[in-house]
Every structure is written in structure tokens, then in C-alpha cells.
Image (cartoon, rainbow, N blue to C red):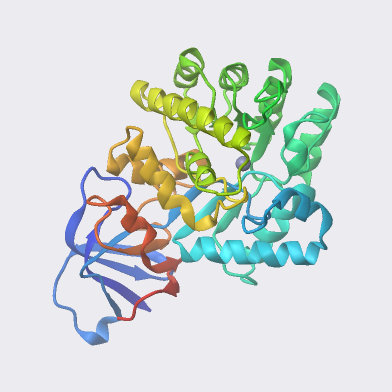
């Protein structure tokens, strides 16, 4: 069965420019061909008119917690106290909303009780609609560390080694570690480093031994530097990283996942205490600086939501892309941060992250031209996943 996106503007995720008046042919779940637009005979297949729309690869969210409910006032207390069935129903809603917003691949960033494995498997079996989920299980962390919110907590080298091995045994396909506390705390522990250099080195070598990629939550300069030296695949946040730490990312070829939407969206909430708001403003300014510096010196930067924090919904990836542009990426590179470059970071670029012949047909149609206005990425008209139209906001 042939489906044809007819007369589209195409941003393929790889090229420097958009193409116009293009037909993209889909068959057997894959992209069959990309051709100049021509008149089509109705018997040829299902025609989807792309006039006025832009076709892009399905978006990739490199850091999200789909089992934490962003609609909850306190997602961490909620997931710790409610029945697991309710948690999974909420997670199914999050996954559906992410997919319908054009997100077709997600790297989950940790869940209590490894609930992300359940969600990943339910999506893969077609029980609930959602993006393809790459799941780490829990986040690996020290006893009492920030990552205990995401189910981790192990003592010393042996404890951490056992934790990471046990998790790989039961289905982790990527590894998430927590190298520091969070910067948002208003006490002296804010962003303080947690994992030692030796511990991070060991965790990276354990992941590599099994062929897994590994990413590290790190928010101060020490934790960013340690993670970069250990050559994790990506460092998450780097809110308070200084110039030396950012340079260390570049010198070790480590990607930055800044999670920029979090600070912006959190500051829009009207329920913050004055103390927390002023802390967030301080972090936001530092964060913008570290991200700008990373872009300026050529660190690879990718897009993400950090969905699961309060009010950080799965549909907000377009905002992170827009802020990446505001911080210095060109519009096209900001789009690549959520498509081809994100796919390379996750190791899935052979099948997704670009629109090219032979790739899996994960694509979206958005209303308008994202290169004129990136907020067009928030106006998703149609979502195709593996060749199937799974959502549409318009009729053709
Ligand atoms: Zn996170």
C-alpha cells in the first residue's frame, strides 16, 4: 500500500536547506522515494496533500520521564504513593500526547521501579499509542542522591556495579547515571557532585562492556567535568557549568542535553515561592550562558523536554527547539537537534531522525514553515509512525 505526501515543503533532517514541491512516497512502513512533485493518478495510492505544510522527520526527545505525571502538582510524591495501575494509565496519556505532538522517539531518563520498561513494552506491543521509548530503568545513583527520585540508590563501587549489572539484566537498553544533586535546591547541597570520578569511570566501562550508551545528569562544573572525562555519551542539564567544564565536553566529544524548556516553563508558573523564583531566575541565566558557550565553541547540543517535571508536558519539545535557536543554534541546526543529531546520540540514526530512502517512515506534517517561525513545530497536523498515520488534525 503506497502513501504519498504530495507537493510538500521538506525538511529532511540532514540537508542545509528545505526543499519545495516534493513528493515523498511511503511503502511497507518505509520511505520509498523522494521525488519532484508531479501530477498523481488517484489509483496510485493514498494521497496526502502537503500544500501549505512542511514534512519533517518525527521528533526525538532525548530526555523525558514519561512515567512521571507532568499534570500532577508533585509528580514524585504521586508516583511513590498511588497504585501502579493508575501510574501506568497516566503514563499512557503522556505517551499518547507526546506522539500526537509529533514525538516518535524518546530516551526516557529514569523511572522508579523501572516502570519505564512496562511503558516501553506496552507501546512496542501496540497496546497504547506512544513514541518508541529507549528505557534505562532506574537512574543509577548514590544512596541518598538525587537519582533516588528515579528509583536508584546504591553504596560504593560494588553497590553501583551491582545496580548497573542488575538493570542491564532485566532490559535496560541505555544507562542513566546521576552525577550531581539538582541546582534548584535553595540549600548548600544545590547541584553538589555525588558520583566520584572512579565511580563514573566504572559505570561507563560497565555500560560499554554490554554495548550500551550512557548519559549523565550533571549540574555543576565538577560533575560535568567528571562525566565528560569519563566519556559518557551525553551530559544532561549543565545548568551551572563554567567555561572549563563546557570545554571539557567539547574536548571529549560529549553531547550536551541542556533541557532548556524546564527553566522557562517553570518560571511561567504562578505558584512558586519568591525564594524559589529568584533561585530559578539565577539558574536560568547561568543555564543560558552555559548553553550559549557550548554552542559557541562547537559542543554538539540536542533537544529534550525533561517531561515529568511539573507542567513540563510531552508536547513542549518545540519550545526547547525554539530556545536552542534563541541561544545560538541556527533554525535548521535547532531542528537537527531534535532529528538527525538526536538520532545519532541515541544510536538509532540508521532507521529514524531523517527522511531518506529506506528509513523508517516516522514523519510529521506541520502547519506552515518552521524555518520562518519555529513555533510551527507546535502546530502538528499529522503524525506518521512506521508508515501508519496515527494522528491527524486536518483532513485531506
Ligand atoms: Zn530529567
**Can the viewer see residue 233?**
no
**Can the viewer see residue 63?**
yes
Q: Where residue 364 sits in the image (x, y, percent)?
A: 37, 63
Q: Quadrant of residue 153?
A: top right
Looking at this view, is 95 or 262 the one in front?
Answer: 262
229 over 371 or under it: above or below: above
Q: Would you say 324 lies left or right of 275 here?
A: left
Q: Quadrant of residue 28?
A: bottom left
Looking at this view, is 72 or 100 the one in front?
Answer: 72
Q: Where residue 314 sits in the image (x, y, percent)?
A: 53, 56
265 over 25 or under it: above or below: above
Q: Where residue 234 sits in the image (x, y, percent)?
A: 54, 32
Instruction: Assign the C terminus to one quadrant of the image.
Output: bottom left
Instruction: Assign the N terminus to one quadrant of the image.
Output: bottom left
Count the numbered circles shown.
Answer: 0
Q: Quadrant of residue 199?
A: top right
Ligand 1: give its quadrant.
top right
Q: Residue at x 63, y 44 (%)?
A: 109
Q: Which residue is drawn at 68% across and 64% down?
A: 90
188 over 334 or under it: above or below: above
Amino acid at each position: 500500500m503506497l502513501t504519498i505526501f504530495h507537493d510538500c515543503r521538506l525538511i529532511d533532517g540532514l540537508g542545509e536547506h528545505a526543499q519545495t514541491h516534493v513528493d515523498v512516497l511511503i511503502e511497507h512502513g518505509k520511505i520509498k522515494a523522494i521525488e519532484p512533485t508531479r501530477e498523481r493518478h488517484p489509483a496510485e495510492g493514498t494521497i496526502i496533500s502537503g500544500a501549505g505544510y512542511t514534512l519533517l522527520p518525527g521528533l526525538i526527545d532525548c530526555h523525558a520521564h514519561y512515567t512521571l505525571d507532568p499534570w500532577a502538582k508533585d509528580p514524585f510524591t504521586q508516583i511513590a504513593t498511588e497504585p501502579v495501575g493508575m501510574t501506568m494509565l497516566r503514563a499512557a496519556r503522556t505517551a499518547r500526547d507526546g506522539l500526537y505532538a509529533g514525538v516518535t522517539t524518546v530516551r526516557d531518563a529514569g523511572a522508579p521501579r523501572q516502570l519505564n520498561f512496562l511503558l516501553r513494552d506496552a507501546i512496542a506491543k501496540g497496546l497504547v499509542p506512544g513514541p518508541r521509548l529507549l528505557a534505562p530503568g532506574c537512574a543509577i545513583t548514590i544512596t541518598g542522591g538525587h537519582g533516588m527520585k528515579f528509583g536508584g540508590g546504591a553504596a560504593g563501587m560494588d553497590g553501583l556495579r551491582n545496580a548497573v549489572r542488575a538493570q542491564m539484566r532485566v532490559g535496560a537498553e541505555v544507562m542513566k547515571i546521576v552525577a550531581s544533586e539538582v541546582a534548584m535546591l535553595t540549600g548548600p547541597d544545590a547541584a553538589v557532585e555525588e558520583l566520584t570520578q572512579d565511580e563514573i569511570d566504572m559505570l561507563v566501562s560497565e555500560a560499554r562492556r554490554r554495548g550500551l550508551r550512557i548519559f549523565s545528569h550533571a549540574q555543576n562544573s565538577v560533575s560535568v567535568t567528571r562525566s565528560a572525562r569519563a566519556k559518557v555519551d551525553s551530559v544532561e542539564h549543565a545548568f551551572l557549568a563554567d567555561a572549563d567544564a563546557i570545554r571539557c565536553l567539547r574536548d571529549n566529544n560529549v553531547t550536551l542535553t541542556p533541557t532548556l524548556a524546564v527553566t522557562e516553563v517553570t518560571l511561567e508558573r504562578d505558584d512558586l515561592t519568591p525564594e524559589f523564583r529568584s533561585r530559578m531566575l539565577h539558574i536560568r541565566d547561568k543555564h543560558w550562558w552555559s548553553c550559549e558557550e557550548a554552542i559557541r565553541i562547537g559542543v554538539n547540543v540536542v533537544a529534550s523536554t525533561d517531561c515529568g517535571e511539573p507542567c513540563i508536558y510531552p508536547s513542549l519539545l518545540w519550545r526547547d527547539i525554539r530556545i536552542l535557536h534563541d541561544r545560538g543554534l541556527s533554525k535548521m541546526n535547532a531542528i537537527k537537534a531534535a532529528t538527525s543529531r538526536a538520532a545519532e546520540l541515541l544510536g538509532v540514526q540508521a532507521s529514524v531522525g531523517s527522511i531518506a530512502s529506506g528509513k523508517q517512515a516516522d514523519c510529521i506534517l506541520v502547519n506552515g514553515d518552521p524555518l520562518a517561525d519555529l513555533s510551527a513545530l507546535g502546530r502538528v497536523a499529522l503524525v506518521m509512525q512506521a508508515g501508519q498515520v496515527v494522528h491527524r488534525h486536518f483532513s485531506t
